[in-house]
Image (spheres, helix red, strand yellow):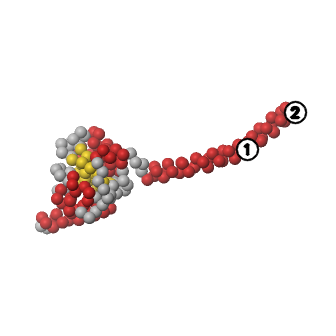
Amino acid sequence: MSRLDTKKVLVEDLNKIAQEAFSVIAVDYRGTNVPGLTQLRKEAKSQSVQLKVIKNTLAKRALENTKFDSLNEILTGPTLLAFSMNDLQSAAKLVKDFAAEEESFEVKGLSIGEGFLEPNELKALASLPTKEEAISMLLGLMQAPLNKLAGTLNEVPSQLVRTVNAVSQTKS
């Protein structure tokens, strides 16, 4: 396989990942040690986050005509791309936690599709609830009024019983 064919395969693979991903974070990993990156890759695999290190020119070609083409401007220097495959925030949480441990791990920018977000938006994205958490929060909000109604309706017969009981005790 020629070098050109290898590059085409790399671009196609990255383009496919970008098409399926919900969000992507570009990180400058310069100065990060190999054991740290190895640990990051293990954590990423368990959280359905794809980490890719690829030449910037190839990454720009792969991200062309995708929802993440706004990142092309920041693809300079050593860049690691973290693609979140299951939800918006899993890559953001992973990168935020790792950046807290590794000072040299610097976020260049991120995108949740159709636009570029500044690095300071990472914390907001990482704090979003997962789909399951959001559903449980919504169900909790929907259940609260029903619980209050049930408690109120249950209180009427209880109060009647207490009143009858008090009246019977005063007569005896």
In which image quadrant can residue 152 be found?
top right
Q: Please provide percent x and percent y for residue 10.
A: 20, 62
**Pointer 1: what residue?**
156
Quarter holding the C terminus? top right
Q: Residues within 10 Å of mark 1 (few under 14, many from 20)?
A: few
Question: Which amino acid, mark 1?
Answer: Val
Q: Is residue 82 left or right of residue 5?
A: right
Q: Is residue 144 left or right of residue 132?
A: right
The secondary element bearing badge 1 is classed as helix
Determine the residue positioned at 18% across, 66% down. Answer: 8
Quarter holding the N terminus? bottom left
Determine the residue positioned at 13% across, 66% down. Answer: 4
Residue closest to the far right: 171
Residue closest to the far left: 2
For the residues carrying marks 1 and 2, which lies nearer the camera in this image? 1
The one of 51 and 15 positioned closer to us in this rendering? 15
Q: Please provide percent x and percent y for residue 13.
A: 24, 63
Residue 165 versus residue 9 in the image, above or below: above
The secondary element bearing badge 2 is classed as helix
Give the CA separation, mark 1 to mark 2.
Answer: 23 Å
The numbered dot on residue 171 is 2
